[in-house]
Image (spheres, helix red, strand yellow):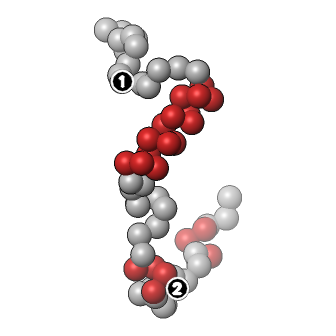
């Protein structure tokens, strides 16, 4: 494969815009009510109890 270091895109100059100051969806944590609704929907779809831990020990133990 060709050397990709020479073709890297320049970083955007304007970083501190109003949008970038807001926490993004990856970092923001939903509030408890939203989280409970998401968990309830996931349980309904998967049909299992909430995962509280590993159900069996790791292989090799």
Residue 3 position (above or below residue 7): above
Q: Residue at x 41, y 69 (%)?
A: 23
User: Element under label 2?
Assistant: loop
What percent of the width, then of the height, locates residue 60? 36, 9
In the image as oriented, which residue stretches furthest toward the front? Answer: 33
Residue 29 position (above or below residue 42): below
Q: Residue at x 57, y 36 (%)?
A: 41
Question: Is disc 1 surrounded by few (<14), some (14 to 19) or many (20+) residues within 10 Å?
Answer: few
Mark toward the viewer: 1 or 2: 1
Question: CA gap, disc 1 to disc 2?
Answer: 42 Å
Q: In the rendered image, which residue does mark 1 sit on?
A: 52
Name the image quarter holding residue 5: bottom right
What percent of the width, then of the height, locates residue 8? 58, 75
What percent of the width, then of the height, locates residue 10? 55, 83
In the picture, the disc for residue 12 is 2
Q: Nearer the viewer, residue 56 or 28?
A: 28
What percent of the width, then of the height, locates residue 61? 31, 8
Q: Is residue 55 left or right of residue 61?
A: right
Q: Is residue 45 left or right of residue 61?
A: right
Q: Nearer the viewer, residue 6 or 26?
A: 26
Q: Residue at x 59, y 28 (%)?
A: 44
Q: Is residue 1 left or right of residue 61?
A: right
In the image as oriented, which residue stretches furthest toward the right? Answer: 1
In the image as oriented, which residue stretches furthest toward the bottom? Answer: 14
């Amino acid at each position: 494969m060709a050397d990709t270091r020479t073709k890297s895109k320049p970083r955007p100059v304007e970083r501190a815009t109003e949008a970038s100051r807001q926490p993004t969806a990856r970092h923001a944590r939903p509030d408890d009510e939203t989280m409970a609704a998401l968990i309830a929907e996931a349980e309904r779809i998967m049909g299992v109890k909430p995962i509280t831990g590993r159900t069996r020990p790791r292989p090799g133990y």
